[in-house]
Image (spheres, rainbow, N blue to C red):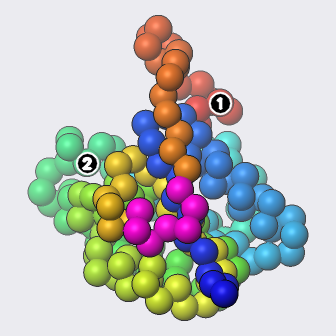
Amino acid sequence: MNNFYTHIYAGDGKGKTSAAVGLAVRAAGSGKKVVFAQFFKGTDSGEISILKQFVTVIRLPKSYGFWKTLTEYEKKELTKEHNIILQNAVSIKSDVLILDEIISAYNYQAVDTSKVDALLEEKPQFREIILTGRNPSSKLIGYSDYFSEICDIKHVFAKGIKAREGIEY
């Protein structure tokens, strides 16, 4: 019987991070130790201020913006920061490890993919590992025990409505 499970929340719809936050709340509320590590995100958001009260949160010291707009120097700097986040996150003994937006970091090779692969193959001290992001490779999907796809059917962004505090961030 498998004692370790890998979850993926993927897709182009709104709610991947929200689903991971919900799982973090549920796990912490049940007495489990949770580590919530974020990749590509450094700007404060409503869920982070609440999560910090009851789970370990590890994230970037600043926002870098979108990968496609970064210079080569900024990409190297961001990749270094992501590797530090991953190293710090896996070094903490916890029941639940959430790697928010790790799929994008993996796809852009903005994190050491061999370390991500090793983590997902070995699942050392974690009971649950959650990955979020868009377009997971078949390799990442192969590691998963749960796979949920969140689809963008309709979104207010299409009407030109900007992200709203407390709703989108």
Q: Looking at the picture, how far across and down is residue 157, in whole percent?
A: 47, 18
Residues drawn in magenta: 141-147
Amino acid type, label 1: Ile
- Residue at 40 percent of width and 68 percent of height: 142
N-terminal of the pair, mark 1 or mark 2, is 2
Q: Looking at the picture, how far across and down is residue 146, in whole percent?
A: 57, 61
Label 2 near label 1: C-beta < 8 Å?
no
- Front position in the image: 51 or 12: 12
On screen, residue 61 versus residue 75, left or right, reads: right
Q: Quadrant of the C terminus?
A: top right
Q: Residue 167 has which mark?
A: 1
Report, in whole angstroms, how far the alpha carbon at label 1 lies from the one at label 2. Answer: 24 Å
- Label 1 residue SS: loop
Amino acid type, label 2: Trp
Q: Looking at the picture, how far across and down is residue 17, in whole percent?
A: 57, 48
Q: Looking at the picture, how far across and down is residue 160, in whole percent?
A: 44, 11
Q: Residue 67 has which mark?
A: 2
Residue 143 lies within the magenta run: yes
